Image (spheres, rainbow, N blue to C red):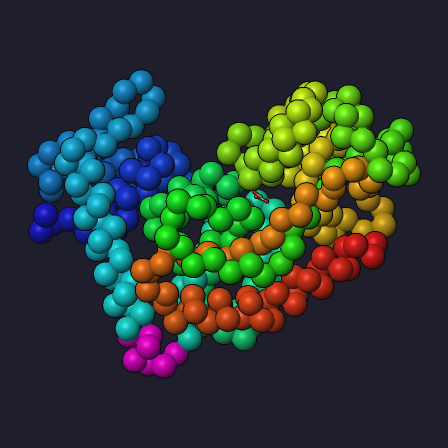
């Protein structure tokens, strides 16, 4: 392994995590041939195949799995070292790795703006994924902090709530149910419904609520993003249940309205979580304190502006 480089290990780790050279290339801003070349050289240094290809999918070999866990140890040790040095320098500098679920993208960047201004030495990597992919990242210890609405119960984590995340029934402004009060759930079930993709936390919460009431939704369309669903609602394709935060920045010209439906909003919260036992970097601790104090206020303000609109 003397000839292997840190860069090759990073490329390998990304390829192993995604099970794909193409997706690793996208993440690392490299070309696919570069990724494949780096993995090839690493394979040569190891002297055994690291991946095997079955159909279109890549699988790790036993040697690949061993190398992946070694890589994660190495990266962990290196980031601890970085932390120690930053501590020694007493500086708030380094990288903050944040992973947030899709709806959090409507307020997290607003929180990051003033934070970055105050700490110009901190670089941010912000990953926006759905709930299931975020849990996968947590599982692989990919980030410092995670923001989501439904903290996993089967992990040993520290979990701090910081903001409400109400889910509302949304429709196009001239929908026949607009203006009605206390619309029964069974009436909602008669409308064509636009659902988020499997693995989405929003979808999970909607399904749970309707299943508990023994009511079956008429799902007409499944879409993998809140923005796509908003466009589909505006285009008259159906109604949906989304976080009230997706209306941030919509303004008075918005084509979407919130219907007054019995049992709604579904009351949820935003949580920031991290695995217990994880040594938070100075940077991550600084952000955590900021989020729970000032950041929380910024997020609340964003929600309030949007509600007044
Ligand atoms: P989602 O998560 O983007 O996976 O739907 C949002 C949430 O859980 O509120």
- Place of residue 206 in the rendered image (x, y in percent of width and height, measured from the top left): 64, 34
Q: Which residues are magenta?
A: 85-91
- Place of residue 268 in the rendered image (x, y in percent of width and height, measured from the top left): 62, 49
Residue found at x 31% / y 18%? 55
**Quadrant of residue 76 within the rendered picture:** bottom left
135 vs 58, nearest the viewer: 135
Q: Quadrant of ligand 1?
A: top right
- Place of residue 73 in the rendered image (x, y in percent of width and height, measured from the top left): 22, 53
Residue found at x 39% / y 44%? 154
Q: Is residue 197 magenta?
A: no
**Quadrant of residue 16 within the rendered picture:** top left
- Place of residue 200 in the rendered image (x, y in percent of width and height, measured from the top left): 55, 36
Q: Is residue 148 above or below residue 17?
A: below
User: Left or right of 150: which side holds 33?
Assistant: left
Residue found at x 16% / y 33%? 62
Can the viewer see residue 27?
Answer: no
**Quadrant of residue 18 within the rendered picture:** top left
């Amino acid at each position: 392994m003397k000839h292997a480089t840190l860069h090759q290990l990073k490329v390998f780790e990304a390829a192993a995590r995604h099970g794909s050279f193409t997706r690793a290339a996208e993440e690392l801003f490299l070309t696919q041939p570069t990724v494949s070349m780096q993995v090839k050289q690493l394979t040569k240094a190891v002297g055994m195949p690291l991946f095997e290809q079955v159909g279109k999918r890549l699988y790790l070999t036993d040697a690949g799995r061993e190398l992946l866990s070694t890589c994660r140890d190495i990266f962990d040790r290196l980031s601890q070292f970085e932390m120690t040095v930053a501590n020694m320098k007493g500086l708030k500098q380094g990288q903050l790795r944040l992973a947030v679920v899709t709806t959090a993208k409507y307020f997290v960047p607003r929180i990051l703006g003033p934070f970055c201004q105050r700490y110009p030495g901190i670089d941010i990597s912000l990953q926006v994924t759905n709930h299931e992919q975020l849990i996968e990242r947590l599982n692989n210890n990919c980030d410092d902090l995670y923001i989501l609405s439904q903290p996993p119960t089967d992990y040993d984590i520290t979990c701090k709530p910081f903001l409400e995340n109400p889910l509302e029934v949304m429709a196009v402004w001239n929908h026949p149910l607009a203006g009605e009060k206390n619309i029964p759930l069974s009436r909602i079930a008669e409308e064509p419904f636009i659902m988020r993709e499997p693995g989405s936390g929003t979808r999970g919460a909607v399904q749970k609520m309707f299943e508990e009431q023994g009511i079956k939704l008429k799902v007409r369309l499944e879409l993998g993003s809140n923005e796509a669903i908003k466009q589909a609602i505006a285009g008259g394709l159906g109604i949906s249940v989304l976080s009230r935060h997706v209306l941030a920045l919509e303004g008075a010209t918005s084509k979407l309205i919130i219907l007054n439906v019995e049992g709604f909003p579904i009351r949820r919260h935003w949580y920031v979580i991290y695995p217990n036992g994880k040594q938070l970097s100075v940077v991550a601790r600084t952000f955590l304190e900021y989020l729970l104090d000032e950041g929380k206020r910024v997020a609340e303000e964003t929600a309030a502006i949007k509600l007044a609109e």
